[in-house]
Amino acid sequence: MDFRGHYCSTRRDLEENGWFLTTRLSSETSRLLILIGQDHEAFLDAKNLCDETRAELVESHRQLQ
């Protein structure tokens, strides 16, 4: 495989991962908003998931750059 083909495949994988993480963060943020004022422990768990997903997204973006 030549470099361009490898690069395109790698870039596509990184972009798909970024899209997946963005979608996941959106869902988790929606869940977080629903939990406000209802269940403090569930809210904290959801917040941690949002923080972890955001960190993964930042890393994915860094790799894409």
Image: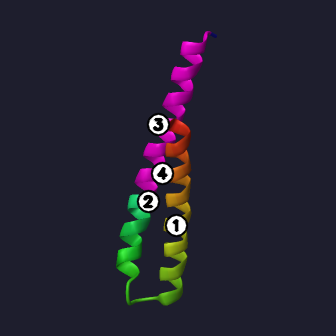
Which residue position holds label 4? 21
Please state which of residues 30 and 53 is positioned toward the viewer in this rendering: 53
Quarter of the image with the N terminus is top right
Left or right: 56 as drawn, with respect to 27: right
Magenta residues, start to end:
2-24
Between 42 and 57, the one lying in front of the other is 57
Q: What amino acid does circle 4 point to? A: Leu
Q: Main secondary structure of the magenta part?
A: helix
Q: Mark 3 touching mark 1, by CB under 8 A?
A: no
* Badge number at residue 25: 2
Q: Secondary structure at mark 3?
A: helix
How does the figure colour the protein chain or chains?
rainbow
Quadrant for residue 52, please give it. bottom right
Give the x, y percent position of residue 23: 41, 52
Query: How would you rate the neighbour count of disc 4 (Cα within 10 Å): few for under 14, some for 14-19, many for 20 or more?
Result: some
Q: Could you tell me which secondary element the residue under label 4 belongs to? A: helix
Residue 51: mark:
1
Q: Is residue 17 magenta?
A: yes
Q: Residues within 10 Å of mark 2 (few under 14, many from 20)?
A: some
Q: CA distance from mark 4 to mark 2?
A: 6 Å
Instruction: Find the distance from the CA under tag 2 to the CA under tag 3.
Output: 15 Å
Real-space CA distance between mark 1 and mark 4, rounded to the nearest whole angstrom: 12 Å
